[in-house]
Amino acid sequence: MNVPRLVIAAPSSGSGKTTVATGLMAAFAERGLAVSPHKAGPDYIDPGYHALATGRPGRNLDAFMCGPELVAPLFAHGSAGCDLAVVEGVMGLYDGAAGRGELASTAQVAKLLRAPVVLVVDASSQSRSVAALVHGFASFDPQVRLGGVILNKVGSDRHEVMLREALEEAGTPVLGVLRRAPQVATPSRHLGLVPVAERRADALASVAALAGQVRAGCDLEALLALARTAPPLDCAVWSPREALAEAAGGVPAGSAVSPVSPGPAGPRPVVAVAGGPAFTFSYAEHAELLTAAGAEVVAFDPLRDEALPEGTSGLVIGGGFPEVYAPELSANEPLRAAVAAFAEAGGPVAAECAGLLYLAGSLDGKPMCGVLDADARMSERLTLGYREAVAVADSSLAANGTRLRGHEFHRTVIEPGAGTTPAWGFTHPERRVEGFVRGGVHASYLHTHWAAQPSVATRFTAAARAAAGSGAVGGDRDGG
């Protein structure tokens, strides 16, 4: 495949990557280009803004969770049929998983995609020194191709002249200059930007303003020309159905729920997926894998809906900000009761982070679903980082011994931190057990990317089908 592509990187966090990447996506989309948006690393929030800018799902490329070998195939899957792909980096260009060298860094993703890099530099407190900074980033790894620089937070015309002169001496093209513009800033809180789902109208205005700023300050023709210098990618295109087929023979034996062939003929179990402002964290590939495994995926909003979708026989509750909406979630007593009854009947439930909190007895003193004998609260401590984990029990999501890499990102605690039967045993960077397995429930703080272990989607769909077939919960819908 040969999709023109750019990686938007920076020397450090806070330099303006999201501003530039989102603005570029929106500006090119306004010109009628089909733009494929991507984000390096595990971040859930930025892809929401990318999706708003392009009208396509924002997709993550995480070399730690999915492995370097899946970065290009997942990129090819997401960008198929597009005119341009823009990849927003993570942290500084060469920052990756702690203690793992370049693993999961923006630089590694750029090399795997054979994509030119545009460096976004916060120039607010420097002039000629910018040339030394850029030279260092350009020469650190000869395999990373730095195609040019976008200067952010430039203070004046005179400041811009000094910066351009310095970079001209260094031989680095300046592809854009953005002035300080606080009016297009997006609000943030304890875990980063406020998700699009919580401020859609304002987010649309912010994205439009970013597009205008980038359109006025960047050389879009030069950036597009640079993107077109990316050579063809020689890789397979990831397919959810093929991924399930390849994984079908690799699920550990002796599991409580036997896997089935992907996409079997016959009635489809309904898998309800929580969404809305309180549950905004989800990877697009999860729904695609569930669908390929034979499920009918139906979204619902725990803030508004008082019942689970009709026929629900599997329940996925991903990450988000339930702590922000604890009073509203608690006030929706009919849905809390429905979730509790579904779990009590043995229905399969996969809950990550926010989902874990929603299943708890309480969150910051507000009653939640009461599925787990545990209580959650906000804390001052941020828990953040990649994890290596192994399933320590059979569950509806994973067979005992299943290994996954994941990511923790929360400022809450749940007590106790693990049930009588934990969900995961962490093997790196620390050894501990975490999460809860109870009946059909698998609940944990760990965010995972199912493309790395497609068997979990097959297994969960099989559990949903079995639950529906038993008559204990839901019921199948017609279809194949």
Image: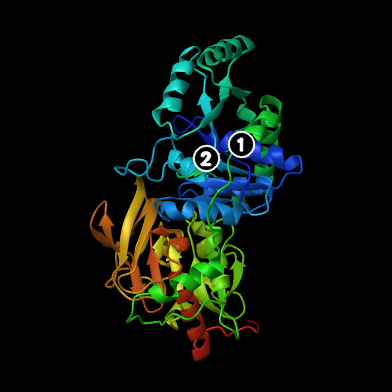
Indicate the quadrant containing the C terminus: top left, top right, bottom left or bottom right.
Answer: bottom right
Q: Which residue is under mark 2?
A: 188
Q: Which mark is residue 65?
A: none
Rounded to the nearest angstrom, the CA distance separating label 1 from label 2 is 36 Å
Give 14 or 255, whichever is nearer the viewer: 255
Q: Which residue is under mark 1?
A: 229
Residue 124 position in % (x across, y down): 52, 19
Rendered image quadrant of residue 206: top right
Instruction: Name the outermost residue toward the left.
Output: 431
| Disc nearest the viewer among 1 and 2 | 1
Q: Determine crowd level at label 1: few under 14, some 14-19, many 20+ residues with C-alpha closer than 10 A.
A: some
Q: Is residue 306 visible?
A: no
- Vertical arrangement, residue 123 with respect to residue 379, above or below: above
Residue 317 position in % (x across, y down): 49, 65
- Vertical arrangement, residue 295 with respect to residue 364, above or below: below
Residue type highlighted by circle 2: Ser
Residue type highlighted by circle 1: Thr
